[in-house]
Image (spheres, rainbow, N blue to C red):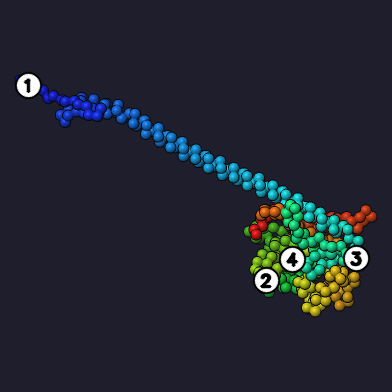
Amino acid sequence: MRKEAVSVTWLVFGECRRGEGASAEDRLVDAACRTQDAGPCSERGIALMMVLWVLVLLSILSMNFLASTRWGSASVRNFKEETQSYYLALSGYQEALNYLAMDKDLAVDFLDGEGNFWIDSEAQPVTGTRTTEEGEVEIRITDENGKININTANQDRLMRLFSYAGVKQEDLTDIVDSILDWKDPDKEHHLSGAEDDYYEALPEPYKTKNGVFTVPGELALIKGMKPEYLSATEEGSRSVLPLITTFGTNSININTVSKEVMETLGLNEVEIETILKQRSKDFGGFRFIPGDFTGRGLNAVATQNFRIEVVAKMHNSPIASRIIGVVSRQNSPQGMDFRTLYWSERAETIRS
């Protein structure tokens, strides 16, 4: 009598189980049973992962939105403060023009020891820093005729100027000769100068102007010129830009010339002190030029070309607006006429 293997099927905690002697058919049934039982659990795991990914995506989108909103708010605030500071600076600039227009004595203007520009000894200067309801405004008025005009300066005066400003001896002749080549109309070289053949061989080529300098910063294009010669890079060092101009004539105003420019002209300490003492409210500056100074390059007591510089910022704001203008003042039957020779405006950040 043939015995048949008997497979036993039992249920443990609701799961299908087969004995060790289960046939292949029984194992297929068991696998199907397990798949049916595990189905709900697997679906729950997939749903959980999807929820987590959605939360991550929403978090990223929220962070991007918050960052965009914050940057947008900052941009709007900065634009508002920049606009307000600009118009505050513009009002200061107009105030400076009004001050120059009310000059009743065009025969003399002077700069006192504190750097304040006086149209006469009666009209109180508008220069300096002051606080308004909106913010802070600083106004400076200087005389372009109190500087050395590099367009009219001869070789000797240029040598003195750049030597005083700290140009190294090995660069001095190259720079001065190159300046003379830049502004003369011909193509002939000075001994150590430069014309088109030098500038066109540079990595970024350009031509010699063969004309006068438009602005002092144009000196940066000259052969041998270095940034530290133009603007002071270290505390206590000298630079040439505050001493020069490209506006006006070859006249230097004894009532507005700076101590540094007087030193480049060869004046000694006693002579400089004598000039500075005369430039006060009590004395009102020079009405005529003493003979000792006329041959030293000081040949004017009044001016027609002014540099106005205004910096303004709102209260509790790091954003400031700076306006720089050079104007020529001429008297006419209708009053004072001003012609703008140069204009620059920019926003900047002031860190306290």
Q: x, y percentage for residue 159?
A: 75, 72
Between the C-alphas of marks 4 and 2, the distance is 14 Å
Q: Are marks 4 and 1 in contact (CB under 8 Å)?
A: no
Which disc number belongs to residue 107? 3
- On the image, which quarter does residue 121 sit in? bottom right
What residue is shown at x 79% (from left), y 70% (from top)?
113
- For marks 4 and 1, give the CA distance: 121 Å
> Residue flagged by tag 3: what amino acid is it?
Ala
Name the N-terminal-most of marks 3 and 1.
1
Question: Could you tell which of marks 4 and 3 lies nearer the N-terminus?
Answer: 3
Judging by the rendered image, the residue that carries numbered circle 2 is: 236
Q: Which residue is mark 1?
A: 2
Q: Mark 4 = which residue?
A: 242
What residue is drawn where x is 82% and y is 67%?
Answer: 111
Residue 11 location (% of width, % of height): 22, 27
Query: 10 Å neighbourhood of mark 3: few (<14), some, or many (≥20)?
Result: some
- Check disc 1: other Cα within 10 Å, few if <14, some if 14-19, many if 20+: few
Provide residue 177's location: percent of width, then percent of height.
Answer: 73, 69
The residue sitting at the top extreme is 1
Residue at the spot x=78%, y=68% of the render? 114
Q: Secondary structure at mark 1?
A: loop
Mark before the other along the chain sequence, 4 or 2:
2
Structural distance between the alpha carbons of marks 3 and 2: 36 Å
In contact (CB < 8 Å): disc 3 and disc 2: no
Identify the image quadrant of the N terminus.
top left
- Of mark 3 and mark 2, the one earlier in the sequence is 3
Of the image marks 1 and 2, the number of the one nearer the N terminus = 1
Q: Can residue 302 be seen?
A: no
